[in-house]
Amino acid sequence: NTLYFYEETGSTNIDAKRLAEEGAPHGTVAVADKQNAGRGRRGRVWQSPAGKDIYFTLLLRPDFAPDKASGLTLVMALSVAQAVEAFCGLTVGIKWPNDIVVNGKKICGILTEMNVEPGYIQYVVIGAGINVNLEQFPEEISKTATSLFLESRTQWPRAELLQNVLKRFEYNYEVFLQTKDLTGIRTEYMKHLVNVDKQVRVLDPEGEFEGIARGIDSSGELLVEKESGGIVKVYAGEVSV
Ligand code: BTN
């Protein structure tokens, strides 16, 4: 597998998509030391200064149906959580579907993008930003974000941590492929899921409601118990505490 390293780039998601259009194979990785146009979900900016953090995007060419692909983001979330936990000895949580948190604050976000043709997937790119050695956040962000350095008072070698993440993804992806859903990794994912038995507010396209999160099903949807009773599956909504 080829790994492309950029000292400075716009966004590794854009690099990975360009590489995909140029025919790069399944498993290609784009990594940057610095991004000038790092992007988060919902059009937000992902601050990406040089020399501190990990910004990478993995290109996949799965041969399953497009509706299965949302599970891949959860596979990456689990892989990051496991790698950071093993590597740094921190307790790492996942805030459904794909924010990675330590002591309640975000250390990693994931942005997945797809190019879909009718009936099949051209390619998927899964981009992740991990706050590794950053020592300071702007006041606004510091309430909700942290870094591995701030949580452990240790500077971590980024290449080794990334290698650990990719190794775990490779393994978890194999397990995912056996059923093309989360059946095989659901238990592991649930161990990290911080929302379990907690009140969540669901910002669903069909309206907001509150309930208690109970876990995920094998497709990766969040199971939320409504106050009125009954369990609903949440897929597209964003969840806040
Ligand atoms: C989020 O909003 O939580 C997702 C953040 C994703 C950031 C990563 S950094 C590497 C890749 N390149 C980007 O421009 N975004 C993703």
Image: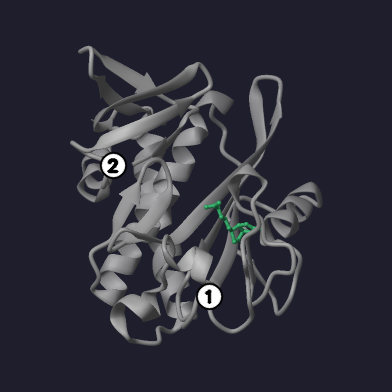
Give the SS element for disc 2: loop
Who's the residue at 38% across and 80% down the image?
A: 149
Q: Quadrant of residue 42?
A: top right
Q: Quadrant of residue 180?
A: top left
Q: Which residue is mark 2?
A: 185
Disc 1 crowd, CA 10 A, few/some/many (<14, 14-19, 20+): many
Amino acid of disc 1:
Asp
Question: Residue 47: horizontal and vertical position, in percent?
Answer: 62, 67
Ligand 1 located in image quadrant: bottom right
Disc 1 and disc 2 in contact, CB within 8 angstroms:
no
Give the SS element for disc 1: loop
Gap between marks 1 and 2 measured at Cα: 27 Å
Q: Is residue 66 visible?
A: yes
Q: Which residue is mark 1?
A: 53
Question: Residue 41: horizontal and vertical position, in percent?
Answer: 59, 46
Who's the residue at 64% across and 51% down the image?
A: 44
Q: Is the distance from the Cβ of mark 2 to the nearest ligand 1 atom less than 8 Å?
A: no
Q: Name the side, left or right, on which 224 lies relative to 20.
A: left
Q: Name the side, left or right, on which 71 lies relative to 60.
A: left
Q: Which mark is on residue 152?
A: none
Up/down of 12 relative to 70, above or below: below
Up/down of 92 relative to 51, above or below: above
